[in-house]
Amino acid sequence: MGALARYAFKKVLIGIPVVVFVTLLLFLIMKQVPGDPIRMIAGERVTQERIDELRKSWGLDQPVYIQYFYWFAKVMTGDFGYSYVTRQPVSYLVWARLPYTLELTFPALVLSYVFGVPLGVIAALGRGKSRDYVTMGISSFFYSMPTYWLGLMLMLVFGLYLRWFPISGSTSGFESLVLPMLTFTLPFIAFSARIARTEMLEVLGEDYVRTAWAKGLPSTRVILRHALRNALIPVTVMFFLDLPWIIGGAVIVETVFSWPGMGSLLYKSILRLDYPVIQGVVFIIAILIVICNITGDIVSATLDPRIRVEPEKA
Amino acid sequence: MLALKSFKETLLRLLQHRTSFAGLLIVLTIVVLAIGASVIAPRGYAETDPVNRLLPPSGQYFFGTDVLGRDLFSRIVYGARIALWVGLLVTFIEALMGVTLGIAAGYYSGIVDKAISAVTDMVWAFPPVVLALGVVTVIGPGLTQVVVAIAATSWPAFTRICRAKVQSLVNREFVLAARAIGETDSSIMARYLLPNLMPSILVVSTLVLPSAILYTTALSFLGFGAQPPTPDWGAILADGAAQLRIAPWIATFPGVFIVITALGFNLLGDGLRDILDPKLRI
């Protein structure tokens, strides 16, 4: 097994306890939540016998760790249980909504990279000049912006006044995707630009870049081959580590635009104390986070062979 | 090196730094609004006036009125108190947790470091809004709960930076000397290492504060934070979202203030970083 494969395998092994830990923690937390789901489903005018019966049929009379074990074993077979509220299978609810969230988040990530990195590089190359101030000023502005407010303002201008795009929902195909996607993307372009600028400045100060300039190489070659290639390593890794944050943002953006993705599903489920759905969504998010982290680690190890060697303690 | 440069010198360089000077001015303006709210605001933040509901901005009501006829300008001015107070509180709790854990992880290598780093990585990887939603689900909605939730989920920035700094300092001569004269571990951490971390902690705090404001207002916007009639900017925005068609000013103004406040702190923080600790990445 090559060094890279061994490294990847180790990372995956570390990922498994993370998923178990996060879901167990959530499971325990959910058990402390005030409000009895059985009462919520059954309503007030139900006998105690019926409630006990229901509790038993949902497995809620067992000790917590048994409940968790059953839940996890079932999840391994793809069975996330049933929503307390709609009685639909959680796996159905989640799978039906996952594509909507991906449809929104994936283009946002790609666009933030495609636009953010060049902006950051332009700012770094013109350090202290007006283009640095302008690029970083605009990027600080978007970086400081709450996504829900940006969403509402886009809705107001492009939806209500100009009437170019529908203001909420997902029924008009691409047109209804535009505003939520912009809301997602703009702050992340700003974020990527900041990171790209920092990394680029760091690399531009390195000895090998100075050497490249001193050798009289053409500036495009120095910038693209010597500097940018190395600056892109941390930026690319950040790209993967960002994904969970984008998913976190999905809760807000999807709620603002009534977009039927996982984020708005999570929001609704929290309001209704619909534990099985909350568990299912968080499980998927935890898995996505672990996958992103592992991918990020593997990508950085591929791009930068030094990372594969465990750093020795000084 | 890392030792805290004199306050005067830092301030002087901050004033020469164009963008961070702008940030400082913004922050000071918001602080003045917050402190002087009762003088600046023409009306009380909960003062309703059913006759004058949903009025657009005018000379009498600078930012218009809301659905209960409350003066939006007054509510936003009082809201500055909440935003600043919440931001400071969250940042302080985060710094307390994060710095303690970070110094411990960096100072004691081995199992302590491994355990702290594992937890830190896990919390760091999880989106704060999702985690905070989980916390609020358990302890219920409210501003205090949101402060706890956000602080409990976003301290890793402090831990990571302090751990790395301490690791680079722990074998330096002044630490070895302290150990040689018989200083205890806790005394070395508190009296020798902590002062060297202060510049970085200050920079991280300035950059964490705006995101604390963004997260708490986001949770208030979703309805899990400040409850009526608290003039939290996020809560006002949530009211405004419901009235977007007929009274767009209600959603517009609190957002402008959130952006301006966050921008002020971010610009100030970027400037402080360039002055105090240019290599810091956050």
Image: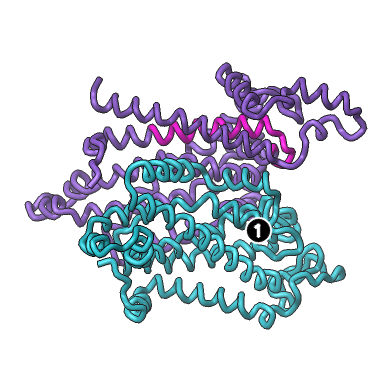
Residue A289 belongs to the span the image colors magenta: yes
Residue A65 vs A253, above or below: the answer is above
**Percent coordinates x, y for residue A64 in the rendering:** 65, 29
A23, A28: nearer the viewer: A28
Residue plotted at (23% across, 41% down): A312
Name the residue carrying label 1. Answer: B144
**Percent coordinates x, y for residue B179 in the rendering:** 26, 60
The magenta region covers A269-294
Locate residue B198 relative to residue B45 in the image: left or right.
left
Residue A56 belongs to the span the image colors magenta: no
Amino acid residing under circle 1: Thr
Chain containing the residue with disc 1:
B
User: Which is the main secondary structure of the residues drawn in magenta?
Assistant: helix
Give the structural element (helix, strand or loop) at label 1: helix
Residue plotted at (19% across, 44% down): A225
Judge whether residue B65 can be spotted in this image: yes
Locate residue A142 relative to residue A240 in the image: left or right.
right
Color scheme of the displayed model: by chain
Colour that chain A carries in the picture: purple
Residue A235 vs B236, above or below: the answer is above
Query: From this viewpoint, which residue is outermost toward the bottom?
Result: B39
Chain letter for cyan?
Answer: B
Residue B170 vs A236, above or below: the answer is below
